[in-house]
Amino acid sequence: MMPDPMPQNTDALTLADGTEITLDSDGHLQRPECWSPEVTRKMAEREGRELTPAHWEIIELLRDFYTRFEMAPAMRALVKTTRQQLGEEKGSSIHLMSLFPESPARVGARLAGLPRPTNCL
Amino acid sequence: MSSKSILVIVRHPPHGSSWVREGLETALVGAALGQPPTLLFSGDGVLALLAGQQRGALGQKGSAAMLEGLSLYDIEPLWYDRYSLEARGLTLDQLMSGCQPADIAGMIARHDVVMSF
Amino acid sequence: MSTLHLINRSPFAASALQELVSAVSEGDHVLLIEDGVYAALGTAASKWPEGVEIRALREDCVSRGIAPASTLLETIDVAGFVALTASTDRTVSWF
């Protein structure tokens, strides 16, 4: 039997030009290379999140982390790398929790088009 | 939760198997739980520390990029067995930054739990 | 405080045994298991530092035709292996 090309439990985003972006059962991109800022905007819109420049700053930082280290950061590493790059005030759990209340590492990675953090339990 | 000191020893080379990545992921889980383990490279494991590694021929992820990020998880330094490095004709200046020589016997004796990869 | 080192690779196929020799401390125990018992055949066993107890797992010696009487080492059975695990502080696997 041929494998099902579109496994169940998947979901998709439709971009302005009609491109379908498929998501896995946890809402992460099935193909991370399909990411664009529009993908993040669509995800946020569906989840009822308003993205401010402060959010985008972290999303960019997450993508940069992934490019350098080939993994999405867990909370501890996210706080540390934010502190290194954006300073003490922003590099705090409080700031990150205020932007992505449920779980900054997990939600941030999803919105940034990255896989789940490697060691997110 | 009782806090035990954990030593992760990596003894396999990168790329040929997933042992290195599995060892690193184990170390990252320890760090996520607030117990960053000691990470030691011995035998062919020291080859994972070589500077200038790339992805595999088919674009597979190696382990070098992950290693560069471990200090952000408070997993540092990257300890290595000096004799394993010498046996392979290598020197410290050929390794990525953050590596330090270790006394393997003493390091084992100082930890509560040792996990090998 | 002592460590039980388990080694399951033949000394003729892998360098694990050589590495292990430099990683033991006085008071440690080494148990040769599976293909590791082939180290009981030859000279590999004579290089150990003082104060380290080397044994081979009897069942693995027997299955490979290395009769306990012909080895240079003491052998222990699986029950002895379990007891050794319980009496040491930590276990390290060399594979």
Image (cartoon, coloured by chain):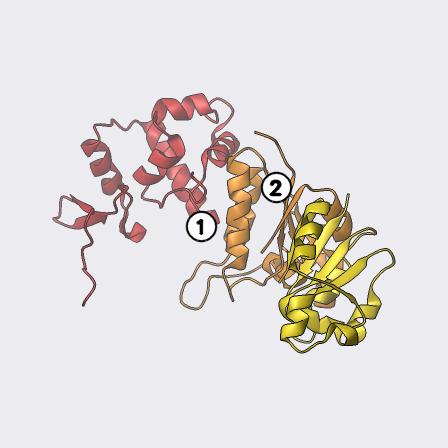
Kindly indicate which chain is depicted in yellow in the rendered structure: C
User: In front here: B22 or A117?
Assistant: B22
> Relative to residue A104, is residue A6 depicted above or below?
below
Would you name the residue on which mark 2 appears? B37
From the top left corner, tell me how far across and down residue A82 is, in percent.
Answer: 47, 32
At label 1, the amino acid type is: Glu
Would you name the residue on which mark 1 appears? A70
Query: Which residue corresponds to the image point at 23% horizontal and 37% vertical from the top-left?
Result: A43
- Name the secondary structure under disc 2: loop
Q: Quadrant of residue A54?
A: top left
From the top left corner, tell me how far across and down residue C47 is, in percent.
Answer: 83, 67
In three-dimensional space, the C-alpha distance between marks 2 and 1, rounded to whole angstroms, equals: 21 Å
Q: Is residue B111 visible?
A: yes
Query: Which residue corresponds to the image point at 26% horizontal and 41% vertical from the top-left?
Result: A27
Quarter of the picture holding the C terminus of chain A: top left
Question: Would residue A98 appear left or right of A1 to someone viewing this image?
Answer: right
| Dots 2 and 1 on the same chain | no
At label 2, the amino acid type is: Pro
- Colour representing chain B: orange
> Relative to residue C81, is residue A112 depicted above or below?
above
Question: Would residue A48 appear left or right of A52 to someone viewing this image?
Answer: left
Depth-wise, is mark 2 or mark 1 nearer the camera? 2
Mark 1 falls within which chain?
A: A
From the top left corner, tell me how far across and down residue C2 is, in percent.
Answer: 76, 47
- Colour representing chain A: red
Circle 2 Cα neighbour tier, 10 Å, few/some/many (<14 / 14–19 / ≥20): many
Quarter of the picture holding the N terminus of chain A: bottom left
Query: Which residue corresponds to the image point at 45% horizontal and 58% vertical from the top-left?
Result: B61
Mark 2 falls within which chain?
A: B
| Residue at the extreme bottom | C65
Question: Would residue A81 appear left or right of A25 to someone viewing this image?
Answer: right
Circle 1 Cα neighbour tier, 10 Å, few/some/many (<14 / 14–19 / ≥20): many
